[in-house]
Amino acid sequence: MQEKLDQWINWTEYDELLEGCHNAPHNLLGLHEFGKGQVFTVYRPEAQKITVTDNKGNHPIELEQVGDGSGFFGKYVPSQKYKKNYLLHIQYGENDVVVTADPYAFDSQLTDYDLYLFAEGNHYNIYEKLGAHPMKINGVEGVHFAVWAPHARAVSVVGDFNMWDGRLHLMRTLAVSGIYEIFIPNVKPGAVYKYQILTRNGDILMKADPYANCAQMRPDTASVVADLRGYAWKDKKWMAERQKESRKDLCKRPMAIYEMHLGSWKKRVEDDDNGFFSYRELAPMVADYVKEMGYTHVELMGIAEHPFDGSWGYQVTSYYAPTRRYGDPQDFMYFVDYMHEQGIGVILDWVPAHFPKDAHGLGLFDGQPLYEHPDPRRGEHPHWGTYIFNYNKREVSNFLLANGLFWMKKFHVDGLRVDAVASMLYLDYGKDDGEWLPNEDGGNENYDAINLFRHMNSEFEKQVPGCMIIAEESTAWPKVTTPAAQNGLGFTFKWNMGWMNDFLEYMRMDPLFRSGNHGRLTFSMDYAYSENFVQVLSHDEVVHGKGSMINKMPGEVDDKFANLRAAYGFMYGHPGKKLLFMGQEFAQYREWSEKRSLDWYLLGEERNAQMQSYVKELNKLYRENEALYVNDYDMMGFEWMSCMNADQSTVSFVRRGLTTKNQFLFVCNFTPVTREAFRVGVPCAGKYSLVLSSDEERFGGTGVKNKDIVTADKITFDGRDYSIEMTLPPLSVTVYRFDYK
């Protein structure tokens, strides 16, 4: 019998196995037919004895160790009565016996078609194939592991279930795909693991799983087996309605977005790096507050797992894992589900632009550049200290595209705000001369990133209709929100960074100097219809020494609040969806920090509570009146009444809906001067009803009074046949409702 076993063994592979560099261990290990019999082979270093039985523990066969203390056991059986669901009884000590199915007795769980699609960059649910997935095969419970590491010499799964011993669970490579896989029986959700990668240079790397669905709490860096199955979603109605939404529908919906960082919105324990509320605890608190304030969506910073709190989630190491800071994946499912039950959409910040150089992460994953571009002029951000994805590699673009689908399908999120789009579009973004490589035409456009965006956004629109993809793009790149089929990038919306920068520059000026900078206030309407914009006052403007929103405003305390109310009023009147970062709604004085909660105690102060009430009123006015949102991207939705009064720093404009009813006139004064008998041109005759003034005493204003209803005079003004006369409060926005006649 031993002679038969010796004939069957490939001794070159045997040597590779013992050296830990075998990349096809299933060829040598497991159950194999040989002649009219069967060969069993097992590699278990430190084992004293190994016995094979059927799956009921019967018909034992004791294997023989090949070589002295090699850990390689084998046996030739002159029959073929055993099936693949046999059991191994592995004895390490007198009373230490492990009973398990053989990891090398299971067929591959990836088909040739899986490998083909992945190589083509079109395997849109690759996250169900790669990573760690609990499953049952041939009646055996365990976890299937698969990882892409084409430059590796060998790969093993190591974890708390095998004493982190890379000799025990060597993986097999599949054809020329570069994918390694193994099914390990008896591993359960919650198991901690990494991939041990032997590089071609002989180095051993310990890497977290790029497709892991859960990770250890930082500072620990291993991946954690998670089971995404079994959550009982309650948002069927929400999801059914979402699926009916087209790009056009989304553009006509109200969107008032509350941008937030979960860890610092409220903390359970201050001055504690781990003093977070969980996803499940945060869900009702966030939903109640957001509903009370009248927002339609929350946008979450930093949900994908990241090692450094100070990156706010923009330096990701586990793209397929919700951060462990607030719970496990099903806890995050609960958060999204709860938001949907309360009628609130959920948008995630998403970072396909770059990733950090942490040793356990994606960088030099298999010993060579894999996810990053191999040329540092294309593959690194020198000033950010991060790697740039290689968008030209199909498997990498597949990783990113599938990741977007993963969040929208598996976690039901309603949209992605794509971070740092400009850094992807421009090869020289953030780089000095000599630090970047032009494209084949000598330009600075990144053709690979452009192709990725078009492919990605087209596929998102097909597979998850009703979801929105928002570009955080800070330049004048054309056609960002034009469909890919029309040679655009295909995003649904674009953050209006140009407006934010110009408008805040205008608002931080002393009113004395605003007249000379009037164009900063009005210029945005010159390009307002070039894209589907979201008007944002985001976290970017209240960090890194830029100060809080209230402290950007000039003047004494009352002036600061009046300026901020005027700013918010103008923003809500301006075409485009709306976004405010948390804390801005009650005028937090301190610059935001991820290390502490918002300063909620300020709501005990009258001014701050009044500001919160004002923002709540703006959201209510916005959501309840289609004129303020339905024609955001149609020229009929907006018309200047006056935009040339630079000397007095005033503007007025009209917002229109789909009917002649309930249209709105905004009159804005950006000086601290009350203007009596102020005349404003209006579009038509009729009555103009006062609906809101930022100067009302309930909001902390001076309380300048105007008539509740004003009838337009047949007096030509601002080039209009009709006009109204009013008292224009200082540093204010006044809103009238009217019907077009």
Image: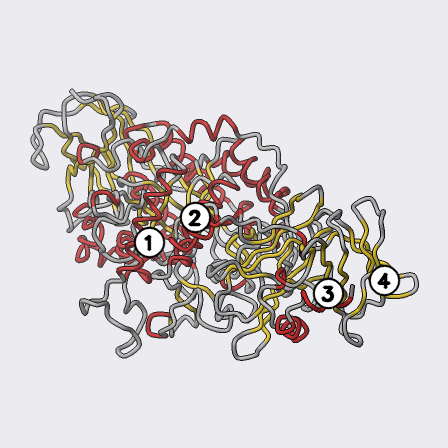
Residue 17 occupies which quadrant of the picture? bottom right
User: Between tags 2 and 1, which lies in front?
Assistant: 2
Residue to which mark 2 is pinned: 123
Q: Is residue 585 visible?
A: no
Return the residue at label 3: 5
> Coloured how?
secondary structure
CA gap, disc 3 to disc 1?
52 Å
Front-most of 322 and 5?
5
- In the image, 251 versus 518, the foreground residue is 251
Q: Is residue 725 positioned above or below 536 on the image?
A: above
* Quadrant (top left, top right, bottom left, bottom right) of the N terminus: bottom right
Lower position in the chain sequence, tag 1 or tag 4: 4
Which amino acid, by three-letter code, is at mark 3? Leu
- Three-letter amino acid code of the residue under disc 1: Leu
Question: What residue is rendered at 63% in x and 53% in y?
Answer: 276
Mark 3 Cα-neighbour bin, 10 Å: few <14, some 14–19, many ≥20: some
- Residue named by callout 4: 91
* Residue at horizontal 45 percent and vertical 64 percent from the top: 355
